[in-house]
Amino acid sequence: MTDNARRRSRERLEERERGILDAATKLFATAGFHATSTRKIAAAAGVSEGTVFHYFGSKNELMLGILDRFYNEVLNPRAAEILDTIMDTRGRLRALAVHHVSSLAADSALMMRLLQVYVGVDLEILGQDKQSPLRDLNRSYVGHLDRAVREGIERGDLRSNLETRPLRDLFFGTLEYGLRTHMYRHGTEGLDSYVDALLEPLWEGLSQSHRSKTPAQLTERLEEACERLERTADRWETAKH
């Protein structure tokens, strides 16, 4: 087989794999993971069910393929670009936050369905082995936040006693809970402003410039930020009606 023939063969295989992933992505988003059979995926992709299993051994592997593509083609490249082009710590955190919520919001139905299902699968795997595919994907992605925090501490922008693991939970947990609430009420309208409102009290807890404040002062600032967030949500609710 010539080099050109091998290349064309490889391209056909890759195209078929993409077609299967695209079909599964659409069906999982609309019908849900459990209600979608591999037979339906094969029909939507224009291939046999055996071909689906040739590329992906199970529906769980298909789901992982979709998540792998989402992490490595959507989440990771832009996060790396943010850290390479933005040097300001607060600007970095904001850009990472906006990127995270906008990426999830762009295909929120699919991501929420898949992550809910796959977390359960992942926990089963973790019961047998501390390594798992989803754990590896998450580790590669949250590494961008870890780098932003580490370099922010080195620059003196962030408190030196910050612990990475709880900070990750706080950062992504706040964004994803806020995203679900905002999407339910307003869709994607005003999403960037909502992210700013979510990040303000978080930044005040992380920033070195706020370290000298007393607990009472920090509590007061947090309450003020929450009140502004509620007023913003009320304005969007009023405008919507």
Image (cartoon, rainbow, N blue to C red):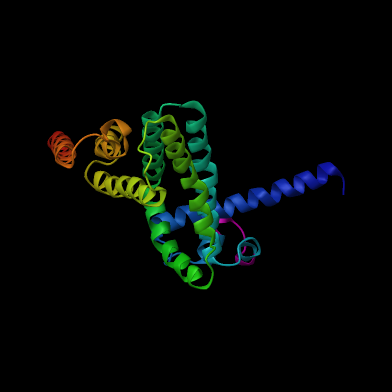
Task: Using the rendered image of the protein, determine whether residue 44 is visible from the camera's viewpoint.
Answer: no
> Would residue 178 appear left or right of 151 to someone viewing this image?
left
Of residue 218 and residue 135, the one placed in the foreground of this image is: 218
User: What is the chief secondary structure element of the magenta stretch?
Assistant: helix
User: Residue sitting at 50 percent across and 58 percent down?
Assistant: 134
Residue 16 locus on image (x, y percent)? 64, 52
Q: Considering the image in quadrants, where does the C terminus appear? A: top left
In the orientation shown, which residue stands out farthest toward the right?
1
In the orientation shown, which residue stands out farthest toward the bottom?
128
User: Residue sitting at 42 percent across and 67 percent down?
Assistant: 120
User: Residue sitting at 52 percent across and 36 percent down?
Assistant: 80
Task: Give the magenta range.
Answer: 43-50
**16 shown above or below 211:** below
Residue 54 falls inside the magenta stretch: no
To which quarter of the image does residue 179 belong?
A: top left
Residue 161 locus on image (x, y percent)? 36, 43
Residue 228 locus on image (x, y percent)? 15, 35
Residue 172 locus on image (x, y percent)? 36, 47
Of residue 4 and residue 126, the one placed in the foreground of this image is: 126
To which quarter of the image does residue 233 belong?
A: top left
Of residue 8 and residue 139, the one placed in the foreground of this image is: 139
> Would residue 235 appear left or right of 115 to someone viewing this image?
left
Task: Using the rendered image of the protein, determine whether residue 85 is visible from the camera's viewpoint.
Answer: yes
**66 shown above or below 51:** above
